[in-house]
Amino acid sequence: MHVTLPDATELQLDDGATGADAAAAIGAGLARAALAVKVDGRVRDLAAPLPDSAGLEVVTARSPEALELIRHDAAHVLATAVLELYPGVRISIGPPIQDGFYYDFEFPPGVTISEADFPRIEAKMAEHIKAAEPFVREDVPVGQALERFVRADQPYKVELIEDLIRNEGVETVSLYTNGPFTDLCRGPHAPTTKTIKAYKLQSVAGAYWRGDANRTMLTRVYGTAFLSKEDLETHLERLEQARARDHRKLGRELGLFEFSEVSPGMAFWLPRGTFLWNELVALTRHMNAERGYTEVKTPQLYDSQLWKTSGHWDKYRENMFITEAEDRQMALKPMNCPGHCHLYSMHPHSYRDLPIRFSEPGLLHRYEPSGTLHGLLRVRHFVQDDAHIFCRDDQIFDEVIGCIEQAFATYAIFGFDVKLELSTRPDERVGSDELWDRAEGILRDALESRELGFDVNEGDGAFYGPKIDFHLTDSLGRSWQLGTVQMDFNFPERFGLEYQGADNAAHRPAMIHRAILGSFERFIGLLIEHYAGEFPVWLAPVQGIVLPISDRHAEAAAATRDALHALGVRAEVDDRSESIGRRIRDAELQKIPYMLVVGDREIEEGSVAVRRHGEGDLGSELIEAFARRVTDERPIGYTGQR
């Protein structure tokens, strides 16, 4: 038999050869470094026999797949340790995730664990890692596997196997054993537990079995693992920075917003936070107006028939807030697009009217389970910088390009790096393959015409059309998906949208869905963490705090504030009877960009002694000069809220 290596060379092997055999045939060093193999793009165990004529790549610690592999290993080792330390515990699932892994447990009655138990669990994990226990795979008949887990009193594994039989018709399942522990698992795994070079348990949370609030609440233990201690230390340091930047913590400290159980998942905006929110809305309105958008306002509550027409009733109903009024089933809108389609349909349109660009900072409500709510990043009530473009076929390309360019112009204001992703048709979708081929081709052509690099995310498009997603990288290196441009030929068809062409015949418009910041709530949460609460001067709710040196300078400080207001600077006065040093310190903690000290000399000169947050004294400036300094820091062409 033979396999083809990444450089296109062929490697001859004996029939039945494994991935380990292939690595050894290439070289002894590679054999020692090998963790797994990729066979035709799929990661498999080193011990698995290779198919003839396959494409083969050896996975080592340098491979992108290595971290996910050893984190999966670490999840099994965690379960091994917990089963030994807490007899009677029931196990469910333990997958690798983006930054680590978790395992869900049902502990016996009266037994709970907390982070205080982590050192004990980690010590037991260390024993199994040091022992270099091999991960051994068995493929066994489902009946044998069921009997094994019933005997071990592991009902969650039994349920998973029964689901595999019912849903996939499997006759065998794979089990992996390391040391005393055997788990139901598809794999793959590294050869032994010793591959886990560095690991740490991080937190405990509750998690309903299969995400169902009517099922058992399990204990989820999160951890992470790396191939070196240095990588782990770097990761933990980044997490510490992220905790210090947590928008929920900073939002309270900076007086931006609060949350209450009176209205879970919905923010109460304080004055400073409301200013921040309004400033972002004003910025998007400014950029939309420059590009020919018309702002509209649509209702919150619609008859269910609207959602049935759009397809959301079947695809999204469980995430909608539903009520009744006068025997009519109604739902709060979770997105703006069906309302904009209905608005378009309420008036006749000519080809001369197109493109029509509706924008709406639309208030939306989505039912998110309480366990998934997370500050401003996952909420039930939010406003999205939404827009929908209705255009002729000959206008589609330019409109898509315009959306992409507006997104890049917006993100540049905040200094974000941007990566693009083209998401293609999902399995569950509406519309013909012909329309999907056309929509995907338009988005791909638009990206390629501007020589924009992009990844393809197969199957992750919306149910009505493919999309370009914008992924932003923040100051901690974390990636956030924010903006989207979606090509849609299906909604115009479903809603029967038309325009009168130059030939006096009825034609179907195309539709483009576009959001750039996404939800303002989530974007503000991102900004707080990206800037660690130290907003750019143009965006800061308070740009300068005026500090009179003593009580006799308070009146002049108030006059300075008023003069700054007149010159377009957002300023406040702190005339408390605290020392000037204490008030400077408090302003630093509030992350106010400028502190403006006013004493005898400043009153005489009509100036302020300027101190920059995080930098220190900048010297004295006339009030007018300082105001120019602040206004010069606005984005070009943008004058702020009016």
Image: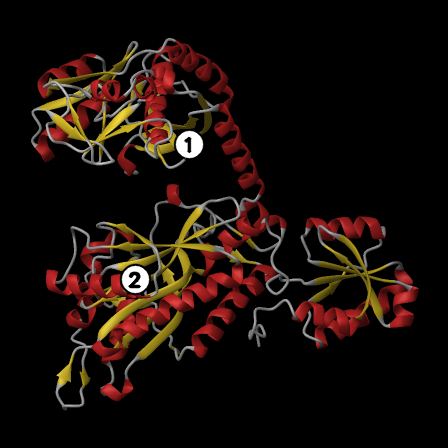
Residue 125's place in the image compared with 379, above or below, is: above
The answer to which of 595 and 337 lies nearer the viewer is 595
Q: Residue at x 22, y 32 (%)?
A: 5
In this rendering, would 217 be left or right of 505?
right
For the N terminus, the quadrant is top left
Residue 597 point in image, percent of width and height: 82, 60
| Residue 606 falls left or right of residue 349 | right
Q: Residue lying at the far front in this picture: please name it.
A: 9
Q: Residues within 10 Å of mark 1 (few under 14, many from 20)?
A: few
Label 2 is placed on what type of residue? Answer: Glu
Report which quarter residue 193 is drawn in: top left
Q: Residue 163: where, in percent of width, then height?
A: 14, 31
Q: Amino acid at mark 1?
A: Ala
Left or right? Give the position of 181 relative to 426.
Answer: right
Residue beneath the point at 89% across and 71% down: 605
Image location (x, y in percent) of residue 165: 10, 29
Give residue 205's mark: 1
Q: Provide the secondary structure element on which disc 2 rests.
A: helix
